[in-house]
Image (cartoon, rainbow, N blue to C red):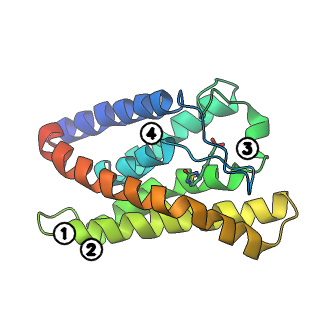
Amino acid sequence: MTTTISVRQLATTAMMTALLVVLGLFPGIPLGLIPVPIVLQNLDIMLVGALLRARFGTISVGLLLLMAFIGLPVLSGGRGGAAVFFGPTGGYLIGWLLAPALISGLSTLWHARETHGWWRELVIILLIGVGLVDLIGSLWLAGQSHMALSTALLSNAAFLPGDILKAIIAVLLARRLRPVLKLA
Ligand code: BTN
């Protein structure tokens, strides 16, 4: 039983990493205000957190980041290489690595994956997948680009409409996919 669950989690881990790579094929949309684009990959980061257990979610995103780090063009618009991690978007990438385990852990604690827990699931994804990622991203951006933290935080508000929509899509998709993929 445990083996079956782990095999399903592993297969979903691989699928989610593949989806991250596919979403990376789409070029980011430049915002203008800050050197951070609007991307699609963070939708999958939220979905990873909603579908997978903590360690599998971390592995799934970790694999993407490892591929990017060694230079494979897996980040939006075909970017990759260690330099990206020290550039303006480095903080978001740290947030991406942390988010799945936190979303998964809080969802278990708060019984958010239950049938009627959709709003709890949405709140967790908004807090972690949007709020925490944007906060770490802004802190990093402010330090890296010598920008006032308030400017970095305010500029991040431009991501909110799109990111809230992505969070809603992630919850809807997760609730459709969990029974199909037979994930707890
Ligand atoms: C990268 O490709 O180097 C990371 C891009 C990070 C983009 C962040 S994720 C949160 C926020 N929402 C977006 O659509 N873009 C930013």
Q: CA distance from mark 1 to mark 4?
A: 24 Å
Disc 4 residue type (three-letter): Ser
Q: In the picture shown, does residue 84 fall above or below 136? A: above
Q: CA distance from mark 3 to mark 2?
A: 33 Å
Residue that badge 3 annotates:
85
User: Would you say the residues marked 2 and 1 are in contact, meaning their CB atoms lie under 8 Å apart?
Assistant: yes
Nearer the observer, 163 or 110: 163
Residue 60 circle label: 4
Front: mark 3 or 4 = 3
Disc 1 residue type (three-letter): Gly
Q: Quadrant of residue 15?
A: top left
Q: Earlier in the sequence, mark 3 or mark 4?
A: 4
Left or right position of 90 against 50: right
Residue lying at the far top of the rendered structure: 72
User: Would you say the residues marked 1 and 3 are in contact, meaning their CB atoms lie under 8 Å apart?
Assistant: no
**Image spot of residue 171 (x, y percent):** 28, 56
Q: CA distance from mark 1 to mark 3?
A: 35 Å
Classed neighbour count for the residue bearing mark 1: other residues with Cα under 10 Å, few (<14), some (14–19), many (≥20)? some
Q: Secondary structure at mark 3?
A: helix
Classed neighbour count for the residue bearing mark 3: other residues with Cα under 10 Å, few (<14), some (14–19), many (≥20)? some
Nearer the observer, 3 or 124: 124
Q: CA distance from mark 2 to mark 4?
A: 23 Å
Residue that badge 1 annotates:
117
